[in-house]
Amino acid sequence: MKPLLEVERLVVEAGGAAPGRILDGIDLRIAPGEVVAAIGASGSGKSTLGLALAGYARPGTRIASGRIRFDEHDVLALPARELRLLRGRDIAFVPQSAAAAFNPALTIGAQVVEAAVLRGEASRAEGSRLAHRLFVGFGLPDPQSIGRRYPHQVSGGQLQRAAAAMAFAGNPKLIVFDEPTTSLDVTTQVGVLAAFRERIRSCKTAALYISHDIAVAAELADRIVVLEHGRIVDQGGARELVSRHGARRRDRALTRVLPDAEPLLAVDRLTVGYGRSAAPVLAEVSFDIRHGETVGVIGESGSGKSTLARALIGLLQSRNGAIAFAGQPLPALVRHRSLRTRKALQIAFQSADVALNPRQRAGDILGRPLTMFRGLRGAERDREVSRLLALFELPADVAMRFPSQLSGGQKQRINLARALAGEPDLVICDEVTSALDGDLRLSVIDLLRRLRDERALSLLFITHDLSCAAELADRIVVLHRGRVVETGPTAELLDRPVHPHTAELVRSVPRPEAGWLDRALAQRPATKPVAPVL
Amino acid sequence: MSITGAARRSLRLPALPTRAVIGLAVLVALLLVSAAAPLLAPFGEAEIVSNESFGFPAVVGPLGTDHLGRDLLSRLLYGGRSTLLLALATTAIAFVVGVGAGLGAAMAGGVIDEVVSRFFDALLSFPSIVLALLMIGALGTSMPVLIGTVALVEACRVFRMARALAIDISALDFVAAARARGEGTWWLAAREVLPNALGPLSVEFGLRFTYAILFLSALSFIGLGVQPPTADWGVMVRENAKGLLYGSPAALVPAACITLVTLSVNTIVDAFADRDQDLRVPDMPP
């Protein structure tokens, strides 16, 4: 069969401050109806490839050479007007962040079929019927009225489905998915993936699915290409590639021997709520953390994880219950806690973008806790800042930079380094790996593991990502709607989950083995929205 | 940490657009010339140099004379000094009061926030010119009363903005991190919140400065502002308005100066507003 898309020796170059090749001679073919996944670490050029298929290069980059043939068109030679027609009609794009792709001021329904109506392919009335069909097809709840809602009125998973619906609206021949599920939590991701797979199969659309997660890619793609530094380094059938790459994953002994002593932190029936009468966000949560132990708290978004972190650190007044730290009762609010407890109990927040003051230099951000908790000033403080930077594998000149001048990974390291600067006994990590992609996430987890082992540090690792928790935690506490539904040693809990919600979380984790999505879907409770039927 | 030359270079600020450079040059020139009024002015501020009212430019004095036969150029220079100085002083006071109260109310929250906010709301509910009339009517037309009145009127607006900014910024995690560390209110306000509010506040300062000039001129125009014989651009417009009937530009020249200052400040403010986009706090993740 003649391929729908044929890419030959494609080269995309970056100009400006850091010249170099982002794509370095890519050859790729996609047959009609075929789904190809492009996987690779961040910076491997996979998003650039997705954009280049429609003849687009980000500002500051340019398509330097090569040929892209799409359905009888030479894409790179097309005049601008025809190229514009090609995009959206024949080649559609599903972006990573649907939240950023939708105009917040227009309704979802209007935007999903906007392009089709503008091109004159459908009248306004036909457009709204088309939108309705698409919403049904993607399993969106309430398809009659969801089109009248604004983007902020639906959940992240629903918005991502709507973004895909927009791409399908014009009946394109090829759809480029650019990491469309990366920002979703695992249980939401399963539903969205199922909807994508169902639509791709029933519409017989060809697709390029870009992802950093081989397990996700394998569920959707017929074929996988692996990108590294702008080159294709491996490719093959999805199942074969997964069995080759997937095997080398976590195989760590998950339990370490711990001294059985008085717990460092004891949380006893902690209940927290916003407002006086509303239902509590956390209800009677109890658990312990021992010296040197890492406890993972997992739960979906909205399960009360971040509220737990804020209550423990003393930013929220609890309604009921008690917290004891090193045997002493801990006052609920931080302003009543002694300098010593504040030093011993530290927090690192989720998003380094908002956790670091944009007007303070990294050196000052790290220096403040050094001054406050350890009394270091002047040259002494600067020396300790340099030592911290080295410990976190950051170059020394980072101290002089503002957060906006640091990369995402560097910012997250500063965020963690600040929490460790005061030499605490327990660090609460609130989703510190969620905003990072594959490689960065692993390096941050490695770093945490190393620091924990070197310093006998205890960690409370809060995450929605079970696989991250499994990498680090000795024990796991599962939160569901503000309650602890299950707790136990990591390996045991993962192998034999008792509570149905835990079981669902465990199944929802993308696994490096074929067919996990089907199994996760098959075992979902019937009340959940399952794969749509059209 | 000290800032080294290298770090400063790496922070190289983007060049200002031409419009803003011109605006800045005009503003600096006007400020310098006004400040040097006693040295530059050919005659005294209230010195009558001719018995011809509304003398024509270049015939009697370089810009002609005003309604009392005083040299218009000298009046313009002295007037610039008082107008710009008054506007700067009132805006500065308004910012100290407004930003202080706004940050304080936002950080304290609760009853304090409620009381302070309602106080400024009450003041804001008066049209500003009416509020000024009341205060000056009650307290007289001395210079301190004038400065205090205009500063208070402006401070209400500044308070609203500063409080809103502080509440927005306080919700971000870096402030939570500082709270969790146990930082006091003073540190939170001065080190965490204020630096991040400076961008929008400096833009607001420029705008408030031009409003202050216009407001002072309006007060002078209705006779409640700067009192004769002190020169002031607003006063000069009023005094010389009659001259328009005789074809004298004596009222237009100070009016043009007011316009010029307002425009130059606005071009600078625009440039800063654009640049601030690059430095602002990132949006919260959804």
Image (cartoon, rainbow, N blue to C red):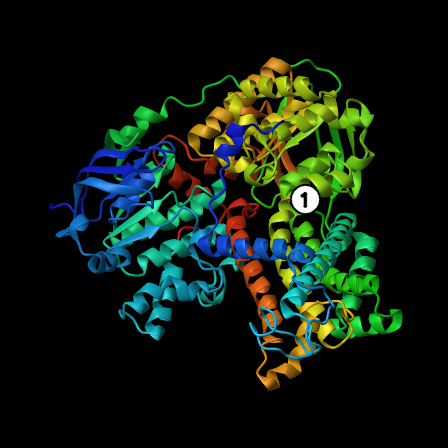
Query: How many labels were placed on the picture?
Result: 1
Name the image quarter holding the N terminus of chain B.
Answer: top right
Image height of B266 relative to B241, above or below: above
Between B154 and A160, the one lying in front of the other is B154
Where residue B210 sits in the image (x, y, percent)? 63, 63
Residue A425's quadrant in the figure? top right
**Residue visible at 80% across and 36% down?**
A335
Q: Is residue A488 visible?
A: no
Q: Which structural element holds mark 1?
A: helix
Where residue B237 sits in the image (x, y, percent)? 66, 75
Q: Amino acid at mark 1?
A: Val
Which subunit holds the residue at mark 1? B
Between A374 and B94, the one lying in front of the other is B94
**Residue visible at 71% across and 21% down?**
A377
**Residue visible at 77% across and 71% down?**
B228
Image height of A248 relative to B280, above or below: above
Between A414 and A359, the one lying in front of the other is A359
Q: Residues within 10 Å of mark 1 (few under 14, many from 20)?
A: many
Residue A29's quadrant in the figure? top left
Horizontal side of residue A381 vs A522, given as left or right: right
Residue A502's quadrant in the figure? top right
Where residue A37 sits in the image (x, y, percent)? 29, 39
Image height of A143 relative to A507, above or below: below
Q: Is residue A514 visible?
A: yes
Horizontal side of residue A313 vs A133, given as left or right: right
Name of the residue lying farthest toward the bottom? B245
Horizontal side of residue A456 vs B187, given as left or right: left
Q: Which residue is mark 1?
A: B193
